[in-house]
Amino acid sequence: MAKVIDGKRFAEGLRARIATAVKALKAEHGLTPGLAVVLVGEDPASKVYVANKARQTAEVGMNSWEHKLAASTPEKELLALIDRLNRDPAVHGILVQLPLPKQIDSTKVLDALDPAKDVDGFHVVNAGRLATGQEALVACTPVGAVMLAKDVLGKLDGLEAVVIGRSNIVGKPVAQLLLKENCTVTIAHSRTKDLPGVVRRGDLVIAAVGRPEMVKGDWIKPGACVIDVGINRIERDGKARLVGDCDFASCEKVAGSITPVPGGVGPMTIACLLRNTVRAACALKGLPVPAL
Ligand SMILES: NC(=O)c1ccc[n+]([C@@H]2O[C@H](COP(=O)([O-])OP(=O)(O)OC[C@H]3O[C@@H](n4cnc5c(N)ncnc54)[C@H](OP(=O)(O)O)[C@@H]3O)[C@@H](O)[C@H]2O)c1
C-alpha cells in the first residue's frame, strides 16, 4: 500500500517556518509583510476561502486586509482599488479572489496588478518569468504540489513526470516547475490519445483535471508518486463528499506514495500564498528572499 502524503501536516510545518521568518523580519528590519485580499460579490465558496486566507495570514503574524465589494461593483472601481493597493507600501501581496462577476474582465484585472505583488502568480509577467527560468512569483497550488513531491521523493532529477491538465493556474505552471527540477515532463489533456498508457510512464503523476476519480489504479506505474490536485464535490450514499481526480482506493494499492483528498494538496495552497507574500515583501524591500 502507498505511503499517504500528509499535506495538512506539511502545510502546518511550512506555516510555522513562515511565522518564524515573519518574526525575524519584524525584529531585524521592522518589516511586517502584508496581504490584501479582494472579494467581489457573495459567492459562498469564495467567502470561505477569503476568510481562511485572512485568518491564516494573521496567525503567522502578517498584516491582513480584506476588501469586500458588492457584486454590482463596476470594473473601473475595482481597477481603482488595485491601483491604490499597488501604490500602498504596506501592502506586499494582492490577491483578487476569482471568479469575478460578469461585468468585470478578469484578464484586465490580473493585468492591472503590480507583478511584484502578484502573490497568486497569475500575471502574465510572472508566468513568462517562470517559463524562461527567471525568479518569479509562482501560482500557489503548483508550488505546493511540487513541494509535496520533493518531500517524499527527494531529488526529482531525471524522473518521468506526467501532468494531466494544461490550465494556466495548475497544469502549465506545475509542468514548468517540474522541468526546473530536471524531470522529463509530459503534459496530457483532453485530446491526449491513450491517456492510461501515457500516465503509466510516470514515475511522478500530477492530476489536475477536475474529473472525479478519473485516474484508476491500473493507470499507475507500480511505486509511482501520485499527487492529486483535483477537488471535486460529489454525492455518494446520499452524502456530499470531496474526492480527487484519482480513484484513491485503487491507486493507493499500486502507487509508492499518494496524496489524499481532502488533506493533500489542498492545505498547501494557502500556506504557499503566505510564503509568496513573505517572498514578495523581501523582494520589494531589497532584502534576501528566504527559501522557506
Ligand atoms: N487549492 C487546490 O488544491 C486547487 C487549486 C486549483 C485547482 N484545483 C482543482 O484542480 C482541478 C483542476 O483545476 P483547473 O483549474 O486546472 O481545471 P481546468 O481549468 O478545468 O483544466 C482542466 C484540465 O484537465 C484537462 N482535462 C479535462 N478532461 C480531461 C480528460 N477526460 N482527460 C484528460 N484531460 C482532461 C483539460 O484539458 P483541455 O485543456 O484539453 O480542455 C484541462 O487542461 C480541479 O478539480 C480543481 O478544483 C485545486
Image (cartoon, grey):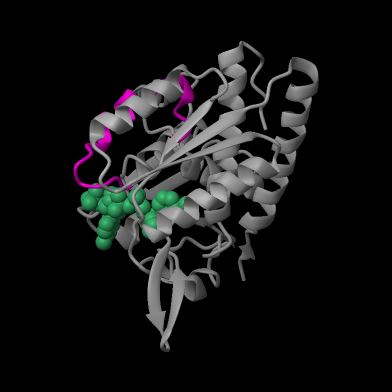
Q: Tell me if residue 126 comes above or below residue 147 in the rendering.
A: above
Q: Is residue 60 left or right of residue 224?
A: right
Q: Position of residue 138 (x, y in %)?
A: 47, 32
Q: Position of residue 289 (x, y in %)?
A: 64, 20
Q: Position of residue 99 (x, y in %)?
A: 31, 48
Residue 253, by quadrant, is bottom right
Q: Is residue 243 left or right of residue 19?
A: left
User: Residue at (71%, 37%) from the top-left corner?
Assistant: 61
User: Residue at (56%, 61%) from the top-left corner?
Assistant: 258
The question of residue 113 being in magenta is answered with yes
Q: Is residue 58 left or right of residue 113?
A: right
Q: Position of residue 7 (x, y in %)?
A: 62, 55
Nearest the eye: 182 or 102: 102
Nearest the eye: 145 or 116: 116
Q: Tell me if residue 120 comes above or below residue 199 in the rendering.
A: above
Query: What's drawn in magenta, residue-wise?
Result: 99-120
Residue 31, by quadrant, is top right
Seen from this angle, which residue lies furthest top?
A: 286
Q: Tell me if residue 168 comes above or below residue 188 in the rendering.
A: above
Residue 67, by quadrant, is top left
User: Residue at (69%, 50%) from the top-left corner?
Assistant: 12
